[in-house]
Amino acid sequence: MAKHRRFVLIAAVITMAVVFLVARRFVPAVEPADLVLMNAKIVTVDDKIPEAAWLAARDGRIAALGSGKNGYKRFVGEATEVIDLNGALAIPGLIESHGHFTSLGSSKMILDLTKARSWDEIVALVAAAANEAKPGDWILGRGWHQDKWDAVPEPSVNGLPVHDALSRATPENPVLLTHASGHSSLANAKAMELSKITRTTTDPAGGEVIRDAKGNAIGAFLETAQSLVRYQAGHYSPEEALQRTRKQVELAARECLVHGVTTFHDAGNSFATIDLYKTMAEEGSLPIRLYVMLSAGNQALAARGASYRMVGAVENRLTVRTIKRLIDGALGAHGAWLLEPYADLPASTGLNTESVDEMRATAKFAVENGFQMSTHAIGDRANREILDIYEEALMAHPEKTDLRWRVEHAQHLSPGDIPRFGRLGVVAAMQGIHCTSDAPWVYKRLGEKRAEEGAYVWRKLMDAGAAISNGTDVPVEPIDPMACFHATVTRELKDGSVFFGDQKMTREEALRSYTLNGAYAGFEEGIKGSLTAGKLADVTVLSRDILTCPEDDIPTTEVLYTIIGGKVLYKR
């Protein structure tokens, strides 16, 4: 009996062992990942799994994340690239929610005037460039700002220089110098001569030719008046223009990768440039993801706008589902449209650059054709007018419950309009760096009371339920997410003062504004903006933990890796 029991027990053990071995043989192995990041502090911006220690990516998407020390090993195969981050911070790929992509590239091909501290210095820079150029060649530059100069130039009108010194230095070369904001320009005599600008030239709607007391153009052009200086007319052949734009795209993409930007919201571009984007994406020469706003008038939109709508084209490299318009100009150029006159220019309330009726027609086209509408609005009057237009569209189409229409900048608001952003579901696409960069002349332009009530009121907007996406408005500001992040969480100016610190974001809020909120602003939160299994494997790795390091260390934090679709496209 005992012998029988032993036999049964042995047989049972052997059977269980065989079953275990067979079962183990048929358990499917985990498919190896293409990329594994390990030994990291991964902040996911996903509330379900806030942090992880490793991430595995396969076929361009996140396959898995985990917190165990060795959990990643089951995803490692012979061809898997494994990167030991040595404790570095990995975050969702940064989203530049408002910039100008080809202008970023162009800024790398012309004179950089951002560091000039006087009009005389600018004249000297242009003169040096003219000495290297052929007679007749255009000299282009960008980045000057009169409020950053050490002194008001003489002679000047409203702080803007008269062209005489520039024209004497460059008699044979037309010159066009764009303001940092892009909302005004300076031209020399040669450029005005070629553009046939005279005393009788009239101001276009939404723009102004600045003149002296005798009525002569001083060479400064505000807002839509900039189009009067036609530097490209006859300057490039169509093929040369196309190749120049391609070069701009390549340079801009490189800048994005170096700064950890994986998705770029291009705030307004033409049909032709969108065609080029699509061509480059299809041929594999567009490394980053573009969310493009179509910039066109109502007649052009009616003719062919609907055919340009595309979502997630070419493996999520290109989306065009937004229409961009401008209802006013910039505060620095006295072009922001205000409810009350400027404190430092009492005769002006700014400029309405596109009529309210035109904007209303654009809104109608957008809502009827499945487009998001994004409107540049800086002044409090501009913001009120566009919120009125948005509200009219919502009331006319109650079935449209998730439009996510945007106000680009939303910099200066009347207190009564702040709650409307949350109530209407309007995204405030703002730029943290504008707050600290512009603050010194915000006081000049608006005065203390208006500045406190409605200038860059991030906390008030968030408390009202509005989503805020972040960015730099590059090339208005450098495409530097760390400088922008620092401005967002400190609101600290160069002199150490703080611009209404009660409106700061926390570091976690600021990170969300640069990731998940940016994805939300583009209807893409289902595929990006957080490090979540199944989403696109877009990751930015930083040299410091910007969520915990001293505030002063944030601006010098460097990008170690930029990863898009599970591929390392930049490594420091």
Image (cartoon, helix red, strand yellow):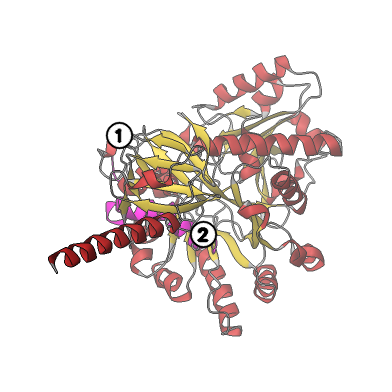
* Residue underneath mark 1: 553
Indicate the quadrant where residue 285 lies: top right
Asked if residue 134 is positioned above or below residue 523 in the image, the reply reads: above
Q: For numbered disc 2, what is the local secondary structure?
A: loop
* Residue underneath mark 2: 527
Residue 347 screen position, x and y as percent: 54, 55
Q: Can residue 498 be seen in this view?
A: yes
Q: For numbered disc 1, what is the local secondary structure?
A: helix
Residue 452 screen position, x and y as percent: 34, 57
Q: What residue type is labelled 1?
A: Asp
Residue 509 located within the stretch drawn in magenta: yes
**Horizontal arrangement in the rendering, residue 118 relative to residue 483 (left or right):** right
The segment highlighted magenta reads: 497-523
**Horizontal arrangement in the rendering, residue 161 relative to residue 302 (left or right):** left
Which quarter of the figure is the N terminus placed in? bottom left
Q: Which amino acid does label 2 sit on?
A: Ile
Residue 409 screen position, x and y as percent: 50, 56
**Horizontal arrangement in the rendering, residue 102 relative to residue 501 (left or right):** right
